[in-house]
Image (tube, rainbow, N blue to C red):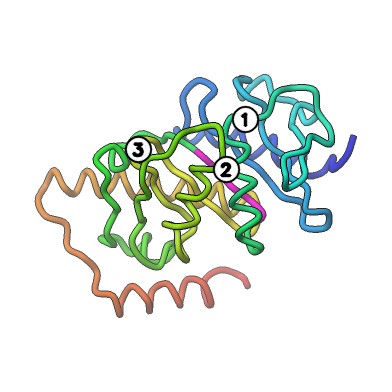
Amino acid sequence: MLLQQLREELLQLHLQLPKNGLVTWTSGNVSIRDPSTGWVLIKPSGVFYEDLRPEDFILLDLQGKVLEGTLKPSSDTFSHLYIYRHRKDVNGIVHTHSPYATAFAAVGKAIPVYLTAQADEFGGIIPCAGLGLIGGEEIGKLVIDAIGSSPGCLLQNHGVFTVGKDGVSAVKAAVMIEDIAKTVWLAMQLGNPIPIPDDVVQALHQRYTQAYGQG
């Protein structure tokens, strides 16, 4: 079986989605691109997270040719592949319908920067792309057009897509979007949230990306 280590990692990342309240039933998926081959591993369609095994993930090339796997790949596969083909820096993608973030998507609203955590992680607004049909490349095109330098965006009437340099980074962004959306929604029940000035957002983002953590 090819890419065994990445398969094990992908299994653990999928388990983080229900653990963090980002998915319901079998909705949502994570994919990882292997930097050395360019091949992509993605979740099979309609399989319960607790039933997933490393060998269940579908291995494809960037054009969608199945290289290994017997199950049907996620219905979002071609959108994932479109994003990978257009973003050489991305090696991990997550799609969820997490409830608070998807509530913003349902009304077609981007999330302004009201929280330092959003400034840190996203460096600006969390944009909202338009409505696209599932099954082809259309959603991938919408993500590429809307996401900019952010690690994530909303999709009108649909949900969330996040990207990262690897699978862990993409899952982290998905967790952060839901946490931010929930906090912003709660703040909106109390009054009008206070936007963070652009210069402060950029200073916070620069500190977080260049000085935070152990390097």
Question: Mark 3 vs mark 2: which is more N-terminal?
Answer: 2
The local crowd at label 1, few if under 14, some if 14 to 19, many if 20 or more residues have their Cα within 10 Å, is many
Q: Which residues are magenta?
A: 91-95
Q: Nearer the viewer, residue 87 or 167?
A: 87
Q: Nearer the viewer, residue 133 or 2?
A: 133
| Disc 3 residue type (three-letter) | Thr
Looking at the rendered image, the disc whose residue lies closer to the viewer, 1 or 2, is 2
114 magenta-colored = no
Residue 213 drawn at (x, y percent): 56, 68
**Distance between the alpha carbons at the discs numbered 1 and 3:** 20 Å
- Kindly identify the residue that appears in the image at 34 percent across and 41 percent down: 156
**Which residue carries the number 2 mark?**
79
Q: Is residue 111 left or right of residue 22?
A: left
Residue 102 is tagged as 3
- Kindly identify the residue that appears in the image at 51 percent across and 40 percent down: 95
Q: Is residue 25 above or below residue 197?
A: above
Q: Write down the quadrant of residue 85 in the picture.
A: bottom right
| Disc 1 residue type (three-letter) | Ser
Report helix, strand or loop for mark 3. helix
**Which residue carries the number 1 mark?**
74
Question: Mark 1 vs mark 3: which is more N-terminal?
Answer: 1
Report helix, strand or loop for mark 2. helix
Looking at the rendered image, the disc whose residue lies closer to the viewer, 3 or 2, is 2
